[in-house]
Image (cartoon, grey):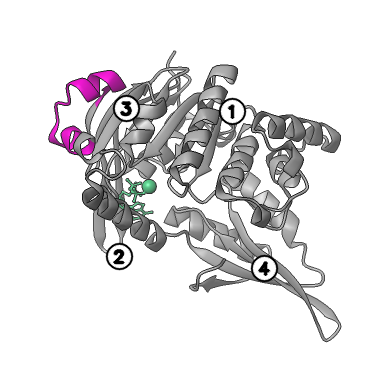
Amino acid sequence: MSAIEVRHLYKTFKQKGETVEALKDISFTVEKGDIYGIIGMSGAGKSTLVRCFNYLEKPTSGEVYVDGKELGSLKEKELRAERGKIAMIFQHFNLLMQKNVLDNVCFPMQIQKKKKSEARERALELLRTVGLEEKAAAYPSQLSGGQKQRVAIARALACDPKILLCDEATSALDPQTTASILELLKDINRQFGITIVIITHQMSVIREICSHVAIVEKGCLVESGTVEEIFAHPKSRAARDIILRDQPEGGAAGISGSWQGEHRQKERLAADKKIRIVFSENSAFEPVIANMVLKFGTPVNILRADTKNVAGVAKGEMILGLPHEEALQIEMQNYLKEKGLEIEEVTEDVE
Ligand SMILES: Nc1ncnc2c1ncn2[C@@H]1O[C@H](COP(=O)(O)OP(=O)(O)OP(=O)(O)O)[C@@H](O)[C@H]1O
Ligand SMILES: [Mg+2]
């Protein structure tokens, strides 16, 4: 049985009267134990495709099979169970800034109601796996980018996933750190037999660790196969372009440099929606957020949490980064309002 199989997948976004066909008739298979790369230009549909793998994005039509089960046919509870087998890491790590490294790794186990002592033990073991045991008490702000990604990887492994999805996980890292993170992913693949899907815009990443690759262009799958096959005999223009662009450092720097520059800028523009929650002394906001994460089966990013003493009353605010999907953003905001929390949209950058 394959790890992931998608059949005739379409995803259309409708927003403000505009229609975007993000995915058009995509079919391919990721076998168990593969390290499968997905490459393409900014806006090609890579993130949307991978988000369909765990139904964070519901396809407009077509099927997604995970471990032989068609996700569209599952009841909510079964879907949540299947999603639990799929972990994800991101370009900007998405760690909880107010929690230390150990608590970040414990967080998913806490949501699963695992016993605290067991969760701690497992978290320490995972931190050993990623080579960061001595940083257990440190806060994310005290770590380098590579170390933050290691923590994110440890957290992703906490629920024993069968599949790990990596969305531009090394795009914010320098080449050396990228190499060490790729090495770690390779180890995890070998040691635990976890199937890995890697989204990237760098052919060097594909070349470094992937067994297979799919090339996505304007929502279509233009080519897929083993990495050797595609490198040796690229059939599509897109594949030839990508291989050509993938010059060693200093090579066609002008081309790849501007491509990546454009990519980063788009990434910033598309930053997740942020909301501010204001609470006073008695509102139990933390369990509300934990329950929301549990209910929607989707993580949110706590970008800031502050409490202030205003005229003798504890007042606080928390800034949350909501997931990309608009429908989910609306549902989450409604959920928070229902629970009596005041929310407002944040437009400025949060560091
Ligand atoms: N929630 C959404 N609502 C409307 N349009 C969306 C949404 N998510 C993605 N899109 C659109 O779908 C297309 C594919 O986007 P996607 O984020 O999957 O691209 P990508 O290949 O991951 O790009 P990048 O390399 O920049 O991350 C883009 O045109 C994008 O604007
Ligand atoms: Mg993307």
Q: How many marks?
A: 4
Give x and y (percent) for residue 165.
48, 35
| N-terminal-most mark, 1 or 3 | 1
Q: Is residue 172 left or right of residue 134?
A: left
Which residue has dot 4 on it?
Answer: 341
- Residue at 76% of width from left, 34% of height from top? 124
The residues bearing labels 2 and 3 have C-alpha atoms spaced at a distance of: 34 Å
Beta carbon at label 3 within 8 Å of ligand 1? no
Earlier sequence position, callout 1 versus callout 2: 2
Residue 227 falls within the magenta-colored stretch: yes
Specify whether 345 is left or right of 215: right
Residue drawn 47% across and 27% down?
196
Residue type, mark 3 in image:
Val
Image coordinates of residue 284 in percent, x first then y, are 77, 62
Residue neighbourhood size for the residue with mark 3, other residues' Cα within 10 Å, grouped as few (<14), some (14–19), many (≥20): many
Q: Name the N-terminal-most of marks 4 and 1.
A: 1
Q: Amino acid at mark 2?
A: Lys
Q: Which of the two residues, 37 or 341, is positioned nearer the viewer here?
A: 37
**Mark-to-mark CA distance, 1 and 2:** 37 Å
* Magenta highlight: main SS: helix
Q: Amino acid at mark 4?
A: Leu
Task: Kindly state the secondary structure of the residue where label 2 is placed.
Answer: loop
- Residue matched to label 2: 16
Mark 3: secondary structure: strand
Q: Which mark is residue 161?
A: 1
Q: Residues within 10 Å of mark 4 (few under 14, many from 20)?
A: some
Q: Camera-side residue: 79 or 29?
A: 29
